[in-house]
Amino acid sequence: EVQLQASGGGLVQAGKSLRLSCKTSGFSLDDFAIGWFRQVPGKEREGVSCISSADDRPYYADSVKGRFTISSDKVENTVYLQMNDLKAEDTAEYYCAVAGSARGICPLLNHWTLSKSARGQGTLVTVSS
């Protein structure tokens, strides 16, 4: 059974850092891509970052490039999102989702169709200014 669980959110001041974790089970990170998304009520979902063994480099949305870093630990089956220099506009619910690891999957992050089983519950990040 595919499972993903995001954790690590919290309340932080602007300029500080948080590290989110996406614990996965039921599949191998060698064969699938993991994307991080965020959503604010009333706004569209935003694809934040993605990592896939089929792509040469991780993907980052322009809004987080240079501040966020995605990484994976295949022993722990966990994907991390290190978020530095947080801004008030980073406030959102963050969640991770899985997709097949085809080449080019990460740049298409905002076009992923997420079934209920392909995404985990989110973790709330609140950045105070």
Image (cartoon, helix red, strand yellow):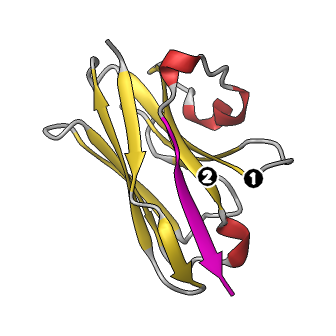
Left or right, 47 with respect to 101, comes to right
Q: Amino acid at mark 2?
A: Glu
SS of the residue at dot 1? loop
Up-down: is 8 above or below 120?
below
Q: Is residue 42 left or right of residue 28?
A: right
For label 1, the crowd category at 10 Å Cα-Cα, with few meaning under 14, some 14 to 19 and many 20 or more, is some
Residue labelled with disc 1 = 40
Residue 32 place in picture, x, y as percent = 39, 23
The vertical placement of 92 against 109, above or below, is below
Residue 54 visible somewhere in the drawing:
no
Secondary structure beneath label 2: strand
Mark 2, Cα crowd under 10 Å, few <14 / some 14-19 / many 20+, is some
Asked if the residues shown at circle 2 and circle 1 are in contact, with their CB atoms under 8 angstroms apart, the answer is yes
Which stretch appears magenta?
121-129
Residue type, label 1:
Val
Closer to the camera, 23 or 75? Answer: 23
Residue 41: image location, x then y, percent = 79, 49
Residue at (53, 43) in percent of width and height: 95
N-terminal of the pair, mark 2 or mark 1, is 1
Q: Is residue 91 above or below residue 123?
A: below
Taking the spot 70% from the left edge, 76% from the top edge, the residue there is 88
In the image, 85 versus 26, the foreground residue is 26
Q: Position of residue 8 (x, y in %)?
A: 39, 59
- Tell me if residue 115 is in the magenta stretch: no
Which residue was labeled with disc 2? Answer: 93
| Above or below: residue 75 compared with residue 94 | above
Specify whether residue 128 is painted magenta. Answer: yes
Which quarter of the rendering shows the N terminus? top left
Measure how far apart labels 2 and 1 are at the Cα level: 6 Å
